[in-house]
Amino acid sequence: MHDIVDLEGRGIPGVFVASREFVEAASTQAAALGFPDVARVFVDHPIQDRTDEEIAALADGAVEAVLAALHAE
Amino acid sequence: MNDAQLPDGLVAVVKADCPTCAMVRPVLEGLGAHLVSEDDDDGLARSYRLGVDTVPTLLRVEAGTEQERTVGWSRERWEALTGVDGLGVDLPPSRPGCGSRTQDPGVADELVARFEGARLQSRRVELSTYEDDAEAMFERGWTDGLPVVPPTETRVLRMLGGTTRAPDEIVTVVPPDLVECTVEKVAINAVMAGCKPEYLPVVLAALEAACTDEFNAHGVLATTMPVGPQLIVNGPVRRRIGMNSGVNVLGQGNRANSTIGRALQLTIRNVGGGRPGGVDRATQGNPGKVGLCFAEDEEGSPFEPLHVSRGFAPDSSTVTLFAGEGPRGVVDQLSRDPESLAGSLAACLRTVQHPKLARRYDAVLVLGPEHGRVFRDAGWDRVRLLEALDERLQLPRDEVLRGAGGIAEGMPPDRMDDVTAKFRPGGIIVVHAGGGAGLFSTIIAGWANGTTGSQPVTREIVP
Amino acid sequence: MRVLDPTAEHAPATRERAARPASLDGHTIALLDISKARGNVFLDRMEMLLRARGLAVERYAKPTFTKPAPIDLRHEISTKCDLVIEALAD
C-alpha cells in the first residue's frame, strides 16, 4: 500500500488488489498512512493453492472494480 | 474530584515510594485522615488538581474547602494544623517529604495534556505508530524544507505558558489567505520552529508588525525580488531570552536568533498559506527567508538604540521588521577617521539593488563594533552619520540615467534632477551589532519602499 | 503521537485521492507485482483483459514484497505511466 500512497502523491491514480484476508489490515494501514480512502479491491481468499485457471477467474471478477477505481464516475 | 469534593477534616496526599509517607502512616491512621494515594490514577489526578508538589502533604478541610496545608513531617506544624498534641512521639521532630508523582517528567506532561488540553481548539492530527514523526511533518507539507519539532499538545501548552495572552485571542489577519490567526496557531508554529516559550512574545509582536498595511506582508511574500521579513530586536528582552548581538550575529548557532524568525516564516506559510511556488514567486530568494532575526548590541553602540531612535522608551522591548534580502559585507580595514569610513559605507550603499537606481529602496546598515568605534572616537551620533552618508550619496544625473555607461537600467530622465539622493529620508536604518574583532560592516538591501512597497515597522513586545 | 494542526485547517487532515481521468482511453496503466507467489498469474490475466480493451499496459515487479518499491522503480512508473494497479497481497 505504501507504493500506491507514494504514487498517488505524485499524481498517479492507483488501486491495490488484495485477498479478503486483508480487509481489516488494509483499513488499519490506510488510516495509519493518513489516507483512509485509498482505493482497494478485494478478491476471494485463498490465493496460493489455486490453479492458474482459478486465479484467472479472480482477475476476471475483479477487473471492473479495479478499472472503476481508476477513472472518474 | 475538585476542591469542593474534598471530605471535611484531614486529607493527606501520599505515595508508596516515600519513606516519610510510610513513617507517618500510623500518625495519619490515628488522626483518621482521608488518604489520597498518588499510586492510583484518581488519586494522582486529585493531587494534580490540588497542586501538590511534595508528599506527604497534609490538608485541613472545612465545608469542602481547603483551609491550610503543610508539607513533609513536622510534629510542631502537624500539631498546630490538627489541633492534636502528642503526635508521632516516637518519630523524629521533623523529616522532609519526597517529590510528588505529579512532578515526574512523563507524568507531568500527561496530566497537563489531560487537564489543560481542552483549552486548545486546533484540529488534532493523529500520527500512527507506523509513521516516523519527523517524516510525517514533511509529508503533510508543514515544513520549510528543514525538520520541525512535532507540535504535541504538551509542547504547545508549554509554549503558551510563555505569554499571558489567551490562546484563542486573535493576533492579526495573515496574508495571503487572510486568515485570522490565534495565539494558539502561532504557538504551534513556534514549537515547530524550535522556539522556547519565552520567545513567543517576540514572535507574536513580529507577526503583528508583519501583517500591518505599512509592512505589507502580502507584497513582501508575492514579489519576485529576493526579500523576506527580517527582525531586529531591542530592549531588555534580548538578554532575558539569550539572543545574540555579537560574534556571528547574522549567522547560525544561537537558538533564539535562529528560531524566532523561523516561527514567523512558518506561521505565514502554514496559517497564511504563503509558500514558494505558490504565492511566493521569488526568482532567487535569499537564505534569510528561512528566518532572520538578530539583536542590536545596544551596550557597545556609539549611538542610541535603534528603537529609541524610532520613538520607543529605552527600557521597552521591541521588534523592528524590515523587508530585506541577503546581507552583503563591507570591508574597510584602513579608515581611521569618520569621513573616510562614511565614504566607504556610502560607496557600498550606492550599489543597493543597482548603482544606477535611487529612492525606491531602503537599506539596513549593520555597523560592526570596530567600525562603530571610529564614529564614537570622533563623537559622531546617528544623525551625523546619516547626514554624512546622504552627502556622499547624491547621484549625478548623467551617471544614473537609463543608458548611461552603456547600461540600459537606470533612472528615467523625466524624474531626475541634476542630483538625486540615493535613499529617501529615513531610508537607511543603522543598527549596531557584531563581534568585537574585524573592521567590517554589513549592508542589507530592502524591497521597494513607499505605499505600494514595504516600510519598516517597529512593534512593542508585550508578555 | 498526536499533534496540533499548524495550518489554517482549510485542507482535509487526511490525504485524498489524486484526480481521476474521465476515461481510460489513451492512458498507460502500470501493473506492479508485489512479488508474492502466484501474483504474476493474476497480473498476466489482468494484462490480457486490459489489452483486450485497447489499453496500454506496462509490467513492473518489486524485488521483494517486504519493503516499499525502490525509489527508481516508483520514479520510472510515474514517468512512463498514468495509472497503476498493484497486486496481489494475500
Image: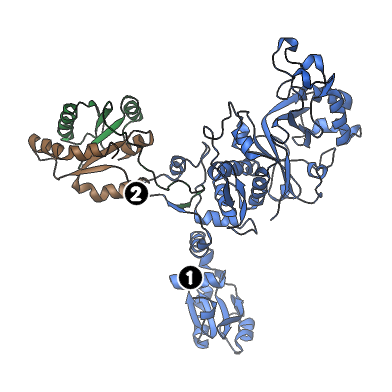
Chain colours: A brown, B blue, C green
What's the residue at 64%, 39% (across, down)?
B217
Label annotation for residue A31: 2
- Indicate the quadrant where residue C49 lies: top left
Q: Dot 2 lies on which element?
A: helix
**Residue at the outermost front position:** B414
Q: Secondary structure at mark 1?
A: helix
Against B207, residue C77 (above or below) is above
Q: Mark 2 falls within which chain?
A: A
In the figure, B165 relative to B58: above or below? Answer: above
Q: B408 left or right of B120? A: right
Point out the residue furthest to the top here. B406
For the point 21% across and 42% down, which residue is it? Answer: A18
Position of residue B146 measured from the top left corner of the image (x, y, whole percent): 52, 37
Q: Is A40 on the left or on the right of B87, as rendered?
A: left
User: Type of residue at label 2?
Assistant: Ala
Q: Is residue B395 left or right of residue B209?
A: right
Lateral position of residue A29 relative to residue B111, left or right: left
Q: How far apart are the alpha carbons under marks 1 and 2?
A: 33 Å
